[in-house]
Image: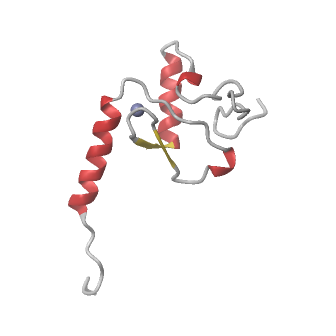
Amino acid sequence: MTDAGKPKTDYKRIFAEVSANRDKLDACPRHLFAPFPLESIRLGAKVECKRCGGRMDLVALNFYIRGFEAAGRNGNDILPGWKDTADDGTPPRRHFGNVED
Ligand SMILES: [Zn+2]
């Protein structure tokens, strides 16, 4: 089996994109994400910080908010509606979908 005919994966470009995204996220003083409809959640979905433009997946966002709260801060400052209903009516989304608790 050969790779003839298969498009080459541009690892340099992918690495540059990942590095650029990491640089944005690392330079951001505090990420801020817009509330999103729970129906939009899908495996691998990423969200973009309104401050730095960096992107992270929802698992990383979940742990980022939990770490923020572990430091004594309010998760709503990262994702409005995380703990309480957001101003636009978006319901609380702890655990991204467990709105009953
Ligand atoms: Zn950010």
Q: Is residue 9 found left or right of 29 in the rendered image? A: left
Which residue extends farthest front? Answer: 88
Snapshot quadrant of residue 27: top left
Query: Residue at the spot x=67%, y=34% of the render?
Result: 93
Front residue of 80 and 22:
80
Residue 49 at what x, y percent from top left? 45, 37
In front of the other: 66 or 49: 49
Judge by depth and name the residue closer to the eye, 54 or 4: 54
Q: Residue at x 74, y 35 (%)?
A: 99
The part of the image, by quadrant, that contains residue 88 is: top right
Could you tell whether 48 is left or right of 24 in the image?
right
- Residue 2, placed above or below residue 17: below
Question: How many numbered discs sit on the rendered protein?
Answer: 0
Which quadrant of the figure shows ligand 1? top left
Picture residue at 30% right of the left edge, 81% below the top = 6
Q: Residue furthest top?
A: 72
Q: Position of residue 101 (x, y in %)?
A: 76, 29
Residue 84: percent from left, percent from top? 70, 24
Colouring of the image: secondary structure
Residue furthest to the left: 12
Specify the quadrant that holds the N terminus.
Answer: bottom left
Q: Residue at x 64, y 36 (%)?
A: 95
- Compared to residue 51, the image places residue 42 above or below, namely below
Q: Residue 38: give x, y in percent of width and height.
A: 67, 44
Q: Is residue 76 left or right of residue 86?
A: left
